[in-house]
Amino acid sequence: MAEIQETSVTSARQKHIVRPSQEMASLGKDDMPVLTKAEGIYVYAEDGRRLIDGPAGMWCTQIGYGRKEAVDAIAHQASTISFASPWYMSTSPSARLAEKIASLTPGDLNRIFFTTGGSTAVDSALRFTEFYNNVLGRPAKKRIISRIDGYHGSTGLAASVTGRKGSWANFDIETDRVSFLSSPNPRHAGSRTEAEFLDDLVKEFEDRIEALGADTVAAFIAEPLLANAGVIIPPKGYHARFKAVCEKHDILYISDEVVTAFGRCGEWFASEKVFDVTPDIITFAKGVTSGYVPLGGFAISDAVIARISGENANGSWFNNGFTYSNQPVSCAAAIANIDLMEREGIVDHARATAGYFRKALESLLDLPGAGAVHSAGLVGCVQCLLDPSQPDGTEEDRAFAARVDEICFDLGLIVRPIAERCVISPPLVITRAQIDDVVGILRKAITQAGEEAGLNAPA
Ligand code: PMP
């Protein structure tokens, strides 16, 4: 108690927390803003300040905050039956949710395994590929091919396939089992056309499979767009070309849709309709509950399941699961979330608003320092580049972008800072007028940060 009286309320509360991505030198000294309430696309800080939630929490609050339908479903399920062992009991929400998700996934991805979030969805999907190849009698087919710049989570296997070097320092990843391809960042094409760049990426994939031996490669894992690297959108046709290579070598194609599913790109799932690929497995989390409660999972195609079930099961058990697999309160929240999205046409709204969102971001490109815009659906970024001809940001660009984010915060907008990219992925219920507010604040912030950095005003 004494401590609480001696320090500010905020820092006293944060004293005992070890948070994600904790800088150890500042452990116990973090001074993060404390949020106390939220409504629609807005969150409110302890001091009463209202902020636009630019990143939708962490790419997840699709329906916005304070939606009674979600809150009531959670309360109802918690007071009816709050828990049942997924090992030997069933509850109606998990079965109904699986049926609903199967109806929204592309192709024949009709079997759903529920986890506790995105990392456990990726981990379980990767463990599934391990299990699958063992049941098929191919114990050597275990390697996973991933990409530099991809992000897939913080549990063991999910972290091992994450291709962001910053995530590796002081951790041990499964280097024997995982092989990384180049980032499909079109800004790395250099003097090549986008088509030539794509050809080279495909060739790198084919060469890698040949070098490793196709009989040792189990899966390829890819986010449709690389959100956590700051919204990198691969060249057009990338995913379909990679899927064709996978098919040739009997390699499972896993699409990590933890960010892109549930409307973010204007479709329930982005793989098929936005990126032209029907994967074997899709992982999801975040938007499935709009972040009200934790839930994740993965969908598997009937064709894959058929090879290792029924008369092909070989006496096997998929002994992988969590106490909170099929969690009834989480599943009830997801059903309410999806119902609400359907009733209010929120995915259609995201699709219809995507062009406006992109144009609004592009309107900033007249500002010195606003180097490029990348977007798909309602996820986008402004790349802050003091020299726009450079593909990636320098230290100075990252400092410039951090300053933009800081000014935005002071002006009432939260921006997701990722290197030199200022990322905006708002709740999907955002209106055009609210997009104007977001971009108005970004304009002021880029202008001010530019002036501070000594950039000239536009001619
Ligand atoms: N995959 C992707 C593409 C993600 O963006 C994330 C989270 N940012 C994860 C996996 C991990 O999800 P979680 O944080 O829910 O474990």
Image (cartoon, rainbow, N blue to C red):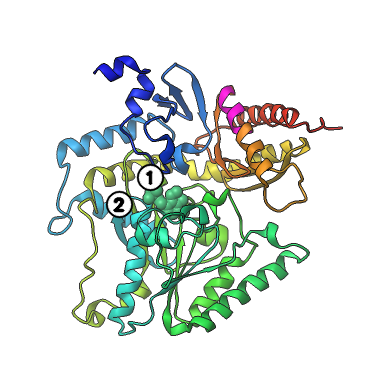
- Residue 32 rendering spot, x and y as whole percentages: 44, 29
Camera-side residue: 66 or 234?
Answer: 234
Secondary structure type for disc 2: helix
The residue shown at (13%, 55%) is 89
- Does 68 sit above or below residue 418? above
Marks 2 and 1: CB-CB under 8 Å?
yes
Q: Which one is earlier in the sequence, the residue at label 2 or at label 1?
A: 2
Residue type pointed to by label 2: Leu
Dot 2 surroundings within 10 Å: few (below 14), some, or many (20 or more)?
many
Q: Which residue is mark 1?
A: 338
Which part of the image, by quadrant, shows the N terminus? top left
- Does 430 sit above or below residue 348? above
Q: Which residue is mark 2?
A: 97
Q: CA distance from mark 2 to mark 1?
A: 9 Å
Q: Which residues are magenta?
A: 404-410
* Left or right for 223, reference 29: right
Camera-side residue: 64 or 148?
Answer: 148
Camera-side residue: 153 or 131?
Answer: 153
Image-quadrant location for residue 156:
bottom left
**Is residue 408 highlighted in magenta?**
yes
Residue 305 visible in the displayed image: no
- Residue 451 rendering spot, x and y as whole percentages: 75, 28
The residue shown at (44%, 16%) is 47
| Extreme residue toward the top, this view | 5
**Is residue 427 highlighted in magenta?**
no
Q: Looking at mark 1, is its residue's CB closer than 8 Å to ligand 1? A: no
Secondary structure type for disc 1: helix
- Residue 434 rendering spot, x and y as whole percentages: 58, 29
- Does 287 sit above or below residue 41? below
